[in-house]
Amino acid sequence: MPVAFPSISPSSRSYSPGNFPQTEFRAQNGALTVVRFGSRRVDSELDLEFQNITDADAALILANYEAVNRTWDSVTFSTASGTSGISGSLAGYISEAGGSGLRWRYAEPPSVTSVLPGRSTVRCRFIGIMDGA
């Protein structure tokens, strides 16, 4: 069961929709052959940064990371978290809710930087995977 990301709005985000799994073969004469291994995107990327949030909110993000990775699960985003401030069909792409089959997993542990007493900046990197489970 996917784990909901905490209701914390990111200060900034970067998204890449990934690409289609394929291999290209180029012959010596320049002819190109492409072997496609599927009709769905893979390896989408989402970077979220939360600037100057409370340490309590930073702890919620770390707890989410632990909950997701404890049982090999995925993360879901809502309009109160990862897709906050985005409207329309773009929010569907970023949440990967539009039938892409991708699920968000942490690409690496969140990075926490203390900026002031009681305030932190947290950066999270996610990768969209197709889990065979």
Image (cartoon, rainbow, N blue to C red):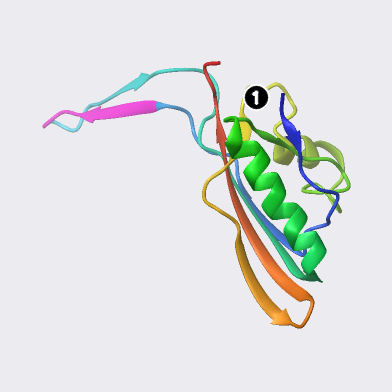
Which span is picked out in magenta? 22-28
Q: Locate residue 31, reporting x and y percent.
A: 22, 27
Q: Is residue 25 magenta?
A: yes
Q: Nearer the viewer, residue 78 or 115?
A: 115
Q: Locate residue 100, reporting x and y percent.
A: 65, 24
Q: Locate residue 69, reporting x and y percent.
A: 58, 38
Which residue is tagged 1? 100
At a point 70% along the width and 32% down the height, the residue shown is 96
At a point 86% along the width and 53% down the height, the residue shown is 85
* 66 versus 21 height, above or below: below
Task: Please tell me how many numbered marks the rendered image carries.
Answer: 1
Q: Locate residue 70, reporting x and y percent.
A: 59, 36
Q: Amino acid at mark 1?
A: Ser
Q: Which quadrant of the view contains residue 35?
A: top left
* 84 versus 56 height, above or below: above
Quarter of the figure that contains the N terminus: top right
Q: Residues within 10 Å of mark 1 (few under 14, many from 20)?
A: some
Q: Is residue 95 magenta?
A: no
